[in-house]
Image: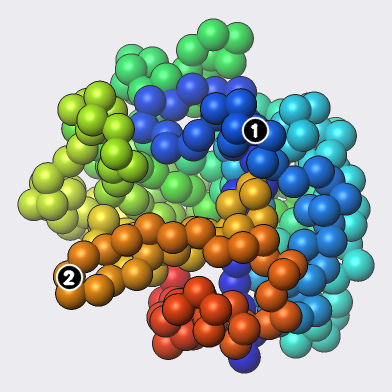
């Protein structure tokens, strides 16, 4: 069996989205693995954990190590060795980025290594993006840049995916966004994942971004209706599904996961993943539900 891993390589970012849960404290930044350890870790995942799909995320992965593009491109070059024409040997690579640093000269270096590029797009309304914090400071014109970047990605043959976080702030602009994507001729989105805003114990953010389940499911149905005549593969992750299936590789090299005992969900962190020989040792030592891993994080699973 082969597996998929979501690797949040760094907590650093150049945007300041209000709903983001990343920890940018000095302690968190210090826990980020250096580039040589990151490359050692992904090699370990490929060889010993049968990982054949790797999502590179952040924060913003293009500022890995606190420098623009340098460490990021070193990681990309390292990953090239895991590309293969043999399906069972090929590592499929997805990049999740805000695309600010993904200029054409940079994406040219990703061709043949990165398979899919994912951008978060929560609205086409500049005022909404301003309120979220995705369209401020030196990185304004988020929507115009998104259009420019996706056209460039399309010309280079990348598969395209969108992420959107559903909150009260962008609630009314999600259907117009879906209608725009459905009618767009400049590029073709193959997959779109919608997340319900999830609390990480930050009450001040919850007051602004938390959304009731009924409103989340109601807008999900409207989005589906707006996209029903497209070939876009849709995915919706509510809070329950996110906590039930949580299995993220953090910038510290540790796995973040939840256990559920008597209805009480508790967050845990593993040791650095290179300290485990394989899935069986990890599941045993951390009391992780192996069936959950196989169901939601195997290639062809439900993630």
Look at mark 1 in the image and give the residue it sits on: 29
Look at mark 2 in the image and give the residue it sits on: 263
In terms of sequence position, does the residue under pointer 2 or pointer 1 come before the other? 1
Left or right, residue 295 beside residue 2: left
Q: Quadrant of the N terminus?
A: bottom right
Left or right, residue 86 beside residue 219: right
> In the image, what residue occupies the spot 72% across and 80% down?
277
Q: Position of residue 235 (x, y in %)?
A: 36, 62
> In the image, what residue occupies the spot 50% across and 74% down?
286
Q: CA distance from mark 2 to mark 1?
A: 33 Å
Q: Position of residue 296 (x, y in %)?
A: 44, 77
> In the image, what residue occupies the spot 34% across and 70% down?
259
Neighbour tally class for label 2: few under 14, some 14-19, many 20 plus, Cα within 10 Å: few
Asked if residue 2 is positioned above or below residue 55 in the image, the reply reads: below
Asked if residue 14 is positioned above or below residue 155 in the image, the reply reads: above
> In the image, what residue occupies the spot 53% across and 14% down?
140
């Amino acid at each position: 069996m082969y597996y998929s891993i979501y690797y949040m390589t760094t907590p650093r970012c150049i945007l300041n989205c209000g709903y983001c849960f990343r920890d940018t404290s000095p302690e968190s930044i210090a826990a980020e693995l250096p580039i040589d350890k990151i490359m050692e870790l992904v090699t370990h995942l490929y060889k010993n954990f049968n990982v054949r799909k790797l999502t590179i995320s952040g924060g913003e992965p293009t500022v890995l190590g606190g420098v623009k593009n340098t460490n990021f491109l070193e990681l990309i070059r390292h990953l090239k060795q895991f590309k293969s024409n043999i399906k069972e040997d090929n590592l499929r690579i997805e990049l999740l980025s805000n695309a600010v640093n993904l200029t054409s000269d940079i994406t040219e270096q990703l061709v043949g290594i990165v398979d899919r590029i994912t951008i978060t797009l929560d609205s086409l309304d500049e005022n909404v993006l301003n309120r979220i914090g995705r369209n401020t400071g030196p990185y304004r014109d988020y929507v115009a840049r998104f259009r420019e970047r996706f056209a460039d990605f399309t010309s280079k043959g990348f598969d395209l995916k969108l992420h959107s976080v559903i909150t009260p702030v962008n609630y009314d602009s999600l259907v117009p966004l879906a209608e725009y994507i459905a009618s767009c001729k400049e590029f073709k989105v193959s997959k779109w994942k919608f997340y319900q805003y999830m609390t990480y114990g930050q009450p001040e953010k919850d007051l602004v971004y938390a959304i009731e389940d009924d409103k989340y499911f109601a807008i999900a149905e409207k989005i589906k209706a707006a996209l029903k005549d497209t070939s876009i593969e849709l995915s919706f992750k509510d809070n329950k599904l996110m906590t039930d299936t949580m299995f993220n590789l953090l910038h510290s090299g540790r796995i973040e996961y939840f256990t559920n005992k008597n209805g009480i969900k508790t967050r845990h962190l593993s040791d650095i993943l290179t300290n485990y020989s394989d899935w069986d040792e990890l599941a045993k030592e951390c009391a992780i539900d192996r069936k959950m891993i196989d169901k939601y994080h195997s290639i062809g699973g439900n993630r």
